Each structure stands twice: as structure tokens, then as C-alpha cells.
Image (cartoon, rainbow, N blue to C red):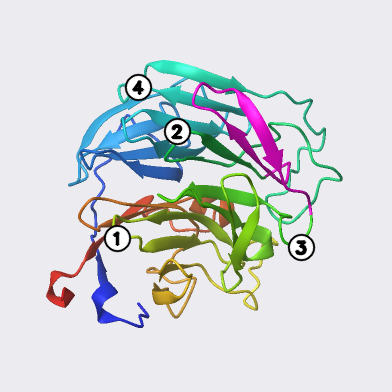
Amino acid sequence: MVTESSKYHYEDVPNWLKLPEHWQVREMSGVAIDSHDRVFALGRGYNPVAIFDSDGNFIDAWGGDLFERAHNIMIAPDNTVYCVDDLGHRIFKFTPDGELLLTINSQNTHTDNPTMTARGQVVNRVHPPFNYPTGIALSPQGDLYISDGYGNAQIHKYDSDGTYLFSWGDFGTETGQFHVPHGVFVDNEGLVYVSDRMNCRIQIFSADGDFVTQWDDVHFPDNICMDKEGIIYVAELGGLYLKGLPIDMRQPAARITIRNRQGHILAEWHTPDPRGTGSFFAPHDIAVDSTGNLYIAEAANTYARGTAPPSWSLLRKLVLNPRNQP
């Protein structure tokens, strides 16, 4: 681990997650925490939504036969669960027990290019919602923001009933443009943070989509979360595997950064050898519980082209070292 402040020294909890034999997944694309500090993990397999307690004990799993490919998960203050199905071009809303409450379907005739944009390819024009959506966030007012990133370059805003309001964005590198807007997050002031992955930056907008500022010291960001103190945690995918195999060691490796509201890095961690047993292959999503513990979901099988060890941790738990608390 590399840090700038001992206040943010974390310890990895080995063998934390206790997967039941019947819940077979290759990787986890999302993680979210409910108001009871239960961990909702989004896996790529049958019954993709699995629930664990804070000690990693399995509670339940649901969602089978609904998803084409699970991509992102978000939990509202009332504990309703929102999921993104990227290949299905839709958004689901569930009760905590898995009852389907709402589906926001695509309005779009999708691109006929199955390559998508996930590893740097571009589609020639922006599309209406959705074209391989990637992330979802909820504002304090109850509005939904959806990043449409793998076959599109826009952020879409919906009201709480799933009614489409407006979109913004285009392909490119200028402010307000995107190249794989992979994740979206809304803070308690209503600011919208977009993980603009292939542009290696996080862009920040007003609730109406007006550009505010950006952080451009990010290593291919996937998603962010924020704790109750306003500290921001960023899952940065890195670029080692973006062009396939063999890996490109000239690109930055995956890492996790801890930042203040201005984007200044308070701490970061990675490993000296990005191919070693302690590295992050593909931190795809990140969540923080009420006590400051971090959970990191990894999509290592897809991103690392199957080269990640079979024993690789699908979902890590990192505990803040109590010896370093002020």
C-alpha cells in the first residue's frame, strides 16, 4: 500500500466473503451498502444480486432470468435497489427482497456494432437512451442519473417515476464530452460526478448538466463513492489490459484513491507488481459502509482476459486500521 496519510491506512480482510456453492459467479461488477450495512454484490451469473452481512455471511440471492449482463448496482435511502443491465439496455428497480418495482427500457435502436466502446473503440454518433448503459445514481431530490457509456457518450436524467427528462454529452475530449462515461454519482449538494474512463478524468456537473470542474489525475476511473464525512473513494481501473494481451506496462496500473471534495488525493494504494497476488486487476465498483469500511468489486475475469488467478478475490473488504484513528 502507498499512502500520504496514516489516517487512511486500511487492512485487507482475507477470505472475508463466504460464497455459497450454489452461487457461481466469475466476477462481480457492482457493490452497494444498504442502511443496515448489508452488502449487496452484483455478480455475473444466475441470481446476480447477492446479499451478505458485514462479516461476509451469505443471506440471499435473487434476480435470475432478468439480466442479460449485470453491470452496476445502487441502493436508495429507502433501501430500494437499482441495477443496470448493460447488454439488456435497461434499468431495474427492486425491493430489498428482489420484487421488481420498475423497469426503464431503452428508447433506442441500438448500434449494430457489438464491439461497443469498452476498450477504446468509438461509435460514430450519440444515441437516445440506452445504448449499453453503465451506471446509475440518485440525487437528494430523487432524480435518477444514468451513464450511457459503452455504446454512447451521454448522461441521462429521469425523475423518480422513471420519466425521461433530458440528456447531455457527446463523444470527445472537451469539457462536457465523454469517452466511456462509465460511472455516475450524485453528492448531497446535487453535484453530478461522471467517471469519464477513457479520458482519464472525473467531470463534475450541476444537476442540470452544466460543467463545473474536472479532476484529470485519474487512472481510467470506473466508479466513486462518498462517506458521511464527504470523503470520496475512487476505483481506478488502470490501463494495463485495455489493449488486450500481452499487457501494456507503459500504462498506469489499477489503484484506489481517497480524495477530498476538491479532488486532492489524501491517500492511495496499489502494489509494486500489478501482476502480483496482492494487486487490483480490475476495481470495477466501490462502496463504503457506515463505519468507513470499503468494499471493492472486481471484474477481473473480463478485464484481465482470464489471466487473473482462479482464487482471485471477487469482492474485497478493506477495514480502516483503528490504531491510526485520531
Residue at (69, 31) in percent of width and height: 129
Q: Give whichever of discs 2 and 4 has the lower sequence position.
A: 4
Residue 285 image point, x, y percent: 45, 51
Q: Which residue is mark 1?
A: 229
From where the camera sits, is residue 144 visible? Answer: yes
Callout 2 secondary element? loop
Labelled pair 2, 1 in contact (Cβ < 8 Å): no
Residue 146 image point, x, y percent: 58, 38
Magenta span includes 153: yes
Left/right of residue 286 with respect to residue 243 in the rendered view: left
Measured in 3D between alpha carbons, the distance from the residue under mark 3 to the one under mark 4, in whole angstroms, is 39 Å
- Label number found at residue 174: 3
Instruction: Tell me the kind of residue under disc 4.
Output: Thr
Callout 1 secondary element? loop
Q: Give whichever of discs 4 and 1 has the lower sequence position.
A: 4
From where the camera sits, is residue 88 visible? Answer: no
Q: Which residue is mark 4?
A: 95
Measured in 3D between alpha carbons, the distance from the residue under mark 4 to the one under mark 1, in whole angstroms, is 28 Å
